[in-house]
Amino acid sequence: MATPKIKEIDESAISRAIIQKAAEDWINITETDVIVAGAGPSGLTAARYLAKAGLKTVVFERKLSFGGGIGGGGMQFHKVVVQSPADKILREIGCSLETLEDDVYVVDTAAMIAKLATGAIDAGAKVIFGVFVNDLIYRDSPPQISGVVVQWTSVKLSGLHVDPLAVKAKAVVDCTGHDAEVLVVASRKIPELHITVPGEGSMWASRAEQLTVENTKEVCSGLFAAGMAVAALHQTPRMGPIFGGMLLSGAKVAQLVAKKVLGEGAPKVTSWTF
Ligand code: 48F
């Protein structure tokens, strides 16, 4: 079989394309509608619904990959459990579910990550890897979170002292998981907001799922939280490898942010109400 002629391209053209297009993206996101910190289940779900609602949405993910805690499944067995009504969120993006019992399903971790990520990107969210949120932009009259401060993960790992960059947004969503990194920054650096992050409580799966979704709220003006960051903020139980609460929390935060940014005329992001 003949090998097809592969298009030749100069190395400098490759470099130029990458630098120019990445710079265009960065310039475009210096002012955006919503910044989501973290591309785990809550962050990717929030990003998809936010973008679908018409909001310019940027996700900063510290690692070079999607999915957060999904990939580890339950103790590295490659399955997680999802219960109703969160199964609807996965069905919308074409993720296969295997029925375990009424309203309870088992999902392959790789499939779930791939579908959530594709869903967010296809809806129009911009995901940037290898960048972490390490501070907030804050204004005090009235108190308002107006964006985030970001840095390359590689800079942190190298131990170099490099000043970060700031990105403005109408809303910031902490989807950083168990460590609630954005909320912790707010609690440490902006004492007048009176945010404390005691950390999550011990395992109680059903209660954890319910409370995570119930407590998904705007924490202070412009700053929202979803997923395990909510459990860390309220010291409510952890749930282990059942993911309905993460997906529903992401959907709920998207609805809250859409209302905040777009007003009462914001579209309904899901067919059910929270
Ligand atoms: O940890 P993670 O999956 O958070 P989540 O969306 O879901 C939690 C579940 O995976 C699971 C659970 C529920 O069943 O207990 O653990 O609440 O995803 C968080 C993502 O945020 C990234 C991190 O690499 C991960 O992909 N992240 C963490 N800190 C930062 C960050 C940061 N400061 N800036 C950007 N990304």
Image: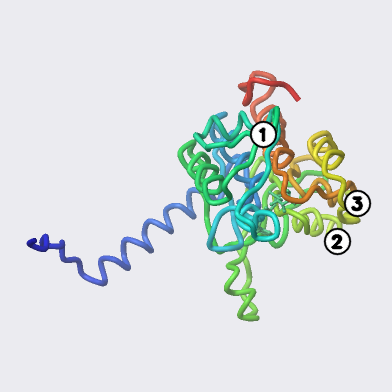
Residue toward you, 22 or 132: 132
Position of residue 232 relative to residue 55, above or below, is below
Q: Quadrant of the N terminus?
A: bottom left
Number of other residues with Cα within 10 Å of mark 3, as a class: few under 14, some 14 to 19, many 20 or more: few
Labels 2 & 3 near each other (Cβ < 8 A): no
Upstream in sequence: badge 3 or badge 1: 3
Upstream in sequence: badge 2 or badge 1: 2
Residue toward you, 19 or 43: 43
Q: Is residue 52 visible?
A: yes
Quarter for ligand 1?
bottom right
Position of residue 225 relative to residue 152, above or below, is above
Residue ID for mark 2 = 188
As helix, strand or loop, the secondary structure at mark 1 comes to helix
* Residue 60 rendering spot, x and y as whole percentages: 59, 54
Labels 3 & 1 near each other (Cβ < 8 A): no
Q: Going 63% across and 71% down the picture, which residue do you hit?
A: 163
Q: CA distance from mark 2 to mark 3?
A: 10 Å
User: Of tags 2 and 1, which is closer to the observer?
Assistant: 1
As helix, strand or loop, the secondary structure at mark 2 comes to helix
